Amino acid sequence: MTPAITDRLRPSDVAPLLTTRWLGRHYHYCEETASTNSAASELARDGAAEGTVVVAEAQTRGRGRLGRAWVSPAYQNLYLSVILRPHIPSGLISQVSLMAGVAACEAMREWCPATIKWPNDILVAGRKLAGILAELEGEGPARFVVLGIGVNLNSGAGDLPPELRDKATSIRIETGAPVDRPRFLARILSHLEVRYDQLQHEGFGPIAEAWGAESALIGQTIRVEEPTGQVSGVVIGLDADGALRLRLESGAEHRIVAGDVTVVGGYPEINRS
Ligand code: BT5
């Protein structure tokens, strides 16, 4: 049984810890909402500023990609959405979710040895610690991205549904110590601000490089279930649109734009020391 966690993510808990210039300076807090991405999307349609953040203690309909659900128990974890208005062509918008994966992984590594799984899961020892859902809406000057991040911080193994127990983990499960959630939120916002500013000002190059280092995937042989069948090859990097570049056995290069990745011989773990 997980001992009760009593911290909260109210504005008064978080504001003293924020080190960002613009990200999270408009902060919306809810005890419970259907999905912080839906709440942020409504705010963005009403003109909310870039950098506006929505945080909930619990979600009743937290969502992942492709209609999947995100399990969101109350007061244990982080359910965060950020409104962004990037100067990036719509065809390259997956750069924003890859940037978020890099920033989120950097924040998590302050607590435990996390890696990125393409396109945007954060894993520890092969189990999922966090997921990212970037949703693009609107057109022209009204266009915006809602970047949703769910991170398991203090859930215990018994707090997750049985079907996730072998696939999911939390920082608390990994380290045995409770996470100070307001402090974690301040750190992830700080990493996100730095990486997003970098993406806007320097382009995708430095993000792709950091992604390569944090994913521990470059040079690994992977197998991918693509909609059209299975391919396997060695990972050589990321393309500008976020596609994963593989070198096939034939020597040809192949781009993966969607699919489920398995590392042949097991997912690499980074050094735990
Ligand atoms: C994701 O989707 O990983 C993106 C999750 C984004 C969640 C955040 S929370 C704040 C914001 N508001 C929202 O409504 N969403 C965002 P996907 O790659 O489709 O992964 C979903 C799959 O992950 C599920 O089908 C489960 O297998 C697994 N899963 C669900 N809840 C989980 C959890 N709490 N921890 C680990 N794995 C989970």
Image: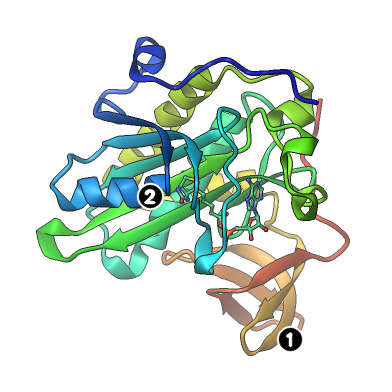
Residue count near mark 2 (Cα–Cα under 10 Å), binned few <14, some 14–19, many ≥20: many
Q: Is label 2 in a helix, a strand or a loop?
A: helix
User: Contact (CB < 8 A) between labels 2 and 1?
Assistant: no
Where does label 1 land, which residue?
250
Which residue type carries mark 1? Ser
Q: Nearer the viewer, residue 108 or 74?
A: 74
Q: Is mark 2 within 8 Å of ligand 1?
A: yes
Position of residue 50 measured from the top left corner of the image (x, y, whole percent): 22, 41
Q: Is residue 271 visible?
A: yes
Chain-order first, disc 2 or disc 1: 2
Closer-to-camera residue (156/137) = 156
Q: Residue at x 30, y 46 (%)?
A: 40
From this viewpoint, is residue 85 visible? Answer: no
Q: Quadrant of the C terminus?
A: top right
Question: Can you tell which mark lies on residue 37?
Answer: 2
Residue 170 is left or right of residue 76, and the answer is right
